[in-house]
Image: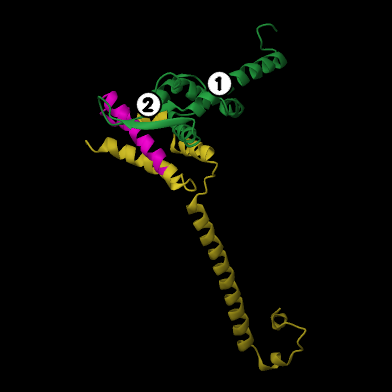
Amino acid sequence: MKTRPNDVVAEYLHEVDQRLTGIPVLQRRELLADLAAHIAAEQSERNLASEGELIEVLERLGSPEVVAAAAHDEAGTRFTPPPPQRSRFWLILGIVAGVLLVLVLCAGLALAQGGASDPAVEQVPRGIPPTVQHS
Amino acid sequence: MADVSQLSTSLRRGTLEFCVLAMVETEDRYGNELVRRLGEEPGLAAGEGTIYPLLSRLRRSGWLESKWAESPSGPPRRYYGLTPAGRSALDHFRTEWVSFRQTVDRLVGTGEAA
């Protein structure tokens, strides 16, 4: 039970850190060190022991989104989340793969139909597609 | 609600930093002190944690200086103090602010004489 309050702090700092992409590394480290020092000072000066009391300290600091947004604002940078970019890459890759699959299937079907049909069909003038014969 | 928070954000921008400078004008203060004090004021800070990036910028722009010092109880504290450049920036803000405030009061009708 004794390590749990620190888990909350570590999780909070991690959440902030994740949103600091784009901010120069030393400013990132500085902010995380300042936040950690703030929490540690509150903890010792107010004799906080429970997780609930620590959560109150973190709530007063503000959500990771709010704190990181302020950091980007002051640094003149903008938060560019890497995960959505990667998921967009996979989305595009998926669409391309899907289109290719459909094309291959269509080509396969056309070939199969062409192969199964009567040899006379091969003689049909080029302007009329083979499928017309079936309808 | 969004408009209300947007207004206070706009008003805060450009003024909050001078409130911070004024707080360390006569004596050095450490992060928790500054943050706690500003957090007590309504509408001044969106969250206590948003003050630290501001302190970082003021230090990098040479208006504040900071030093870590041992604490009588607990972890080391980071103390902030005003530099000569910060002091003249604060003096400049004070004169600008008075005339700015008077102009806005006159135009918006919030002055005491209005």
Location of mark 1 (residue): B91
Q: What residue does disc 2 label? A: B32
Say if the magenta span includes residue A53. Answer: yes
Question: Looking at the image, can residue A52 be seen?
Answer: no
B84 lies above or below B53:
above
Instruction: Describe the element under mark 1 as helix, strand or loop.
Output: helix
Position of residue B92 measured from the top left corner of the image (x, y, whole percent): 58, 23
Q: Residue furthest left?
A: A2
Amino acid bearing label 1: Asp
Give the quarter of the figure containing the C terminus of chain A. bottom right
Q: How is the image coloured?
A: by chain
- Give residue B103's quadrant in the image: top right
Q: Nearer the viewer, residue B110 or A82?
A: B110
In this rendering, position of residue A106 left or right of residue A6: right
Residue at horizontal 58 percent and vertical 19 percent from the top: B94
The chain containing the residue under callout 1 comes to: B
Q: Nearer the viewer, mark 2 or mark 1?
A: 1
In-front residue for pair A104/A89? A89
Residue B3 colored in magenta in the image: no
Q: Main secondary structure of the magenta part?
A: helix
Identified at 74% across, 89% down, the residue is A124
Magenta residue span: A28-54
